[in-house]
Image (cartoon, grey):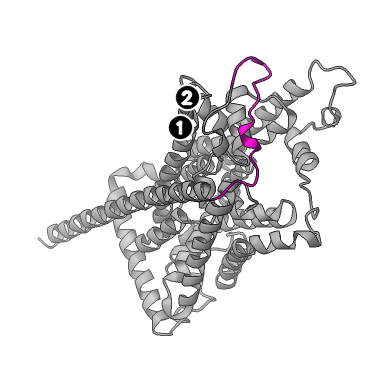
Amino acid sequence: MRGDSHSKMVETSAEHEHEHENLHQHLVLKSAICSRLLLLAMIILFRTLLSPYDTSASLNPPCLSTPNATLSSPLQNAVVWDSVYFLRIAQCGYEYEQTFAFLPLLPLSLSLLSFLPTQTPLFILSAYLINNLAFVLAALYFYRLSLTLLKDPQTALRATLLFCFNPASVFYSSIYSESLYALMCFGGMYHFVCGGNNLAVLFFALSGCARSNGVLNAGYLCFQTMHRSFHALFHQKRLPLALQIIFVGALRTACIFAPFLAFQAYGYYNMCVGRSHEEIRPWCKARIPLLYSYIQSNYWGVGFLRYFQLKQLPNFLLASPILSLALYSIVHYAKSRPQTFFSLGFLAPMEEKSCGVVFLSGDLSRSKEAGSVGKSSSLRIEEHLNLRRRKNVIKGDVATVPIESESAEAWPGYLSASVLPFLLHLGFMACTAFFVMHVQVATRFLSASPPLYWFAAYIMAYPSKYYKWGYVIWAYSITYIFLGSLLFSNFYPFT
């Protein structure tokens, strides 16, 4: 009788949590849609009230392959900044060397609309529709990723709402690659933490077709391979297994890099093969003829410390909020869990590493029968621990769990060991944005990095200690959404 009663309680609790999760997903869906409608309304409003700084976007000459065709559209003057390139590539292909800086996933997605005449407003409206739909799907994936990794529904929901209204929101509602990139990244991350590595590889490979930094997502597979092979070799003493893990990891990593490298080969074939000695470009003669890096350096002046000039100080100030948030999120984790952070997770508690596929365990789909009960039980435990921790902080007892403690129960949510590879990825991206890129791009470059939102949601959960920062983060997002809608939509510099 007691066992039957316990089983009914578990089933009832699981059903309640399932309903709770569905409610949160419905809220995420509504928030994502409302945020896109708000952005589009603001873009239309500011574009109507102000005159654009640059009106040359309406000058859309015919394709080189079809010089007699007309590409002008009544909505062409609504296309700004890099959107001009993406639409041009979708209409005419890669005609010029500099256009190869824009990767093919978005243009290919627009090419699927070939049944629509490219000179009609419907083609441009469809481009907006694709990106905004991709953003909504990305938000849903981000919530599922956050819930799976953090095991705290409230923090996962709060983090997702922050993403829905992130500072780079204007780019996610424009004809830019950010929405498709975020969808592929969050989809790949979700399948990665759920044990679906093959599906994760597909998503990560497609992210590398949207933006060049998508290939950095291979780092998640490398991190996992490193830990699994180490465990197989030194804990299980199984050399063949370790070699197998390394081989499979290398193969998956190669698959993620393959689409980007194939695109570089396509650029080499178009720009270098069959050209006379006078026509051939300098990068074609390089030992490794990488077109993308040449374009970034030659056309946009991207390079290590090349942006460190006094006249660029306003751009550094523009990027300082997102870079500061990234820095503080990493520093806070490192100070809270120094043993785990500085050992790259090798000194994390074994019981903590064994409970997630990020480190050691196999496919979560192997135990589907016990999945729902196990997930709900672990979720209840984590919720209880998170609630206790928040109550302790609210009471002022911040040091209830000592920093030196590295037990699995002591660090749920953002401070769990499974967040570590995401933080390492964020750290590399932030350093690249600061030292190599045009630094103002950091706002949208880092906008698809989950730890930023997880950390912001984490500190918002402790109102007695960090309540001011919650208001600051929301004020920052709202201000940049307003500025982005005002400036970017009218062809003024933003990020």
| Residue with the mark numbered 2 | 113
At label 2, the amino acid type is Leu
Q: Nearer the viewer, residue 313 or 189?
A: 313
Q: Quadrant of residue 249?
A: top right
Q: Residues within 10 Å of mark 1 (few under 14, many from 20)?
A: some
Q: Earlier in the sequence, mark 1 or mark 2?
A: 2
At label 1, the amino acid type is Ser
| Residue at figure coordinates x 46%, y 43% from the top left | 187
Q: Residues within 10 Å of mark 2 (few under 14, many from 20)?
A: some
| Residue at figure coordinates x 57%, y 51% from the top left | 227
How far apart are labels 1 and 2 at the CA level?
Answer: 8 Å
Q: Nearer the viewer, residue 8 or 73?
A: 73
Q: Do the residues under discs 1 and 2 have CB atoms within 8 angstroms?
A: yes
Residue sitting at the far right: 278
Residue sitting at the far left: 1
| Residue with the mark numbered 1 | 126
Residue 200 visible in the shown view: yes
| Residue at figure coordinates x 57%, y 36% from the top left | 77
- Magenta residues span 50-70
